Image: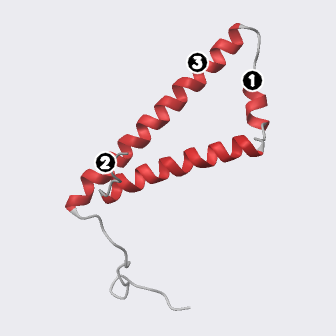
Amino acid sequence: MTKLFPSQAQPRKRKALKPDDIDKVAQALMTLAQELWVVKDRQMVTEAVLAKHGIDISEEISLYQPDLALDAKLCAARQALVLKLTQDITGLYEPLA
């Protein structure tokens, strides 16, 4: 195996963010932060309301396996989020219906 010394190392070949892309990445991060907060908020409220009624669902949630209908709903929501993030990063948005 050949050792690489700093004078022999080749730079990584990858695309760097262009200055115009920074705003798009920032928007994508804000979208993620907003989505994450909504989920965390609703999850905490749901668990608190259920606990108030004597129902602890923490472990059951960890072990839950969704049925086909819920799995499809989760998949559609996941795809919508990925599309929104992709649009934020590329700056290409679909027209509003």
Q: Which residue is mark 1?
A: 57
Q: Which residue is mark 2?
A: 26
Q: CA distance from mark 1 to mark 3?
A: 12 Å
Query: What is the quadrant of the N terminus in the image?
Result: bottom right
User: x and y percent of residue 16 in the render?
Assistant: 30, 68
Give amino acid for label 2.
Answer: Ala
Task: Work out whether 60 lies above or below 29.
Answer: above
Q: Earlier in the sequence, mark 2 or mark 1?
A: 2
Q: Is residue 14 above or below residue 58?
A: below
Residue 7 place in picture, x, y as percent: 32, 86
Q: Position of residue 26 (x, y in %)?
A: 31, 48
Relative placement, left or right, of 39 versus 68 is left
Q: Which mark is residue 45?
A: 3
Instruction: Describe the element under mark 2 as helix, strand or loop.
Output: helix
Residue count near mark 3 (Cα–Cα under 10 Å), binned few <14, some 14–19, many ≥20:
few
Element on which disc 3 rests: helix
